[in-house]
């Protein structure tokens, strides 16, 4: 989640705030097509974008008059909680409040602890691994038997082949 606080021109007091918790890209500019609209002649129609990726947030300057962090012009730069972005040298200032997102590893399942198997039942067994994979990925009407994908290991029978998806061999 990111919050943008438009600061008073002479004080570090927020006069307007915008909070985004679902967007991965937030656009700031003069056009009403932006997420944050700033009515100022020195602000470009689409002045900057804040983009979230797996490393965090970054600002990308798209404006003619530039985007500044700590008085330094930036084209593309990682941003952190509390930083102040200034649009043009004499333009509006926006303070960022960034709440950390759950880490990538905590949002994905731990596949090493799960047993993933695929059981393919066919009338005639394909002879190579490539043929087995093609048979497993074929549309249901092209298969010569029944396919079952499980997260639990199943007992092999005479007419089935099991693949352990966690082991590349």
Image (cartoon, helix red, strand yellow):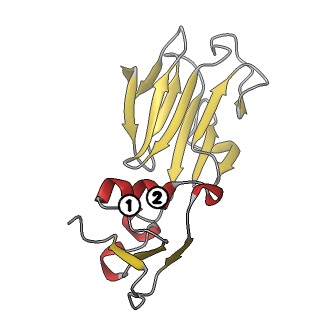
Q: Which quadrant of the rendered structure holds the N terminus?
A: bottom right
The span from disc 1 to disc 2 (Cα, nearest Å) is 5 Å
Q: Which quadrant of the rendered structure holds the C terminus?
A: bottom left
Q: Residue, x 68% and y 15% (percent of image)?
A: 45
| Label 1 SS | helix
Q: Is 10 or 141 nearer to us in this picture?
A: 141
| Residue carrying label 2 | 135
Compared with residue 123, is residue 30 higher up or lower down, i.e. above or below?
Answer: above
Asked whether the viewer can see residue 169, the reply is yes
Compared with residue 88, is residue 51 higher up or lower down, i.e. above or below?
Answer: below
- Find the residue positioned furthest to the bottom: 155
Mark 1 and 2 residues: CB-CB less than 8 Å, in contact?
yes
- Where is residue 37 drawn, in percent x and y? 73, 28
In the figure, is residue 70 to the left or right of 168?
Answer: right
Q: Residue, x 37% and y 66% (percent of image)?
A: 105
Q: How many marks?
A: 2
Q: Is 124 or 42 nearer to us in this picture?
A: 124
Q: Is 73 or 89 nearer to us in this picture?
A: 73
- Where is residue 113 drawn, in percent x and y? 33, 82
Which quadrant holds residue 144?
Answer: bottom right
- Find the residue positioned furthest to the front: 124
In the figure, is residue 143 to the left or right of 152?
Answer: right
Q: Is 69 or 12 nearer to us in this picture?
A: 69
Asked whether the viewer can see residue 100, the reply is no
* Dot label at residue 164: none
Compared with residue 154, is residue 102 higher up or lower down, i.e. above or below?
Answer: above
| Residue carrying label 1 | 132
């Amino acid at each position: 989640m990111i919050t943008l606080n438009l600061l008073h021109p002479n004080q570090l007091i927020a006069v307007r705030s915008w909070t985004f918790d679902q967007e991965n890209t937030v656009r700031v500019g003069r056009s009403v097509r932006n997420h944050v609209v700033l009515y100022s002649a020195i602000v470009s129609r689409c002045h900057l974008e804040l983009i979230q990726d797996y490393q965090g947030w970054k600002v990308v300057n798209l404006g003619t008059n530039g985007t500044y962090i700590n008085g330094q012009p930036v084209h593309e730069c990682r941003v952190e909680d509390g930083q102040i972005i200034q649009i043009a040298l004499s333009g509006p200032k926006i303070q960022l409040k960034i709440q950390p997102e759950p880490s990538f590893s905590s949002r994905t399942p731990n596949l090493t602890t799960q047993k993933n198997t695929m059981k393919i039942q066919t009338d005639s067994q394909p002879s190579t691994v490539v043929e087995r994979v093609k048979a497993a990925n074929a549309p249901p009407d092209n298969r010569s038997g029944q396919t079952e994908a499980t997260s639990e290991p199943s007992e092999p029978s005479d007419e089935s082949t099991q693949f352990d998806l966690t082991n590349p061999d």
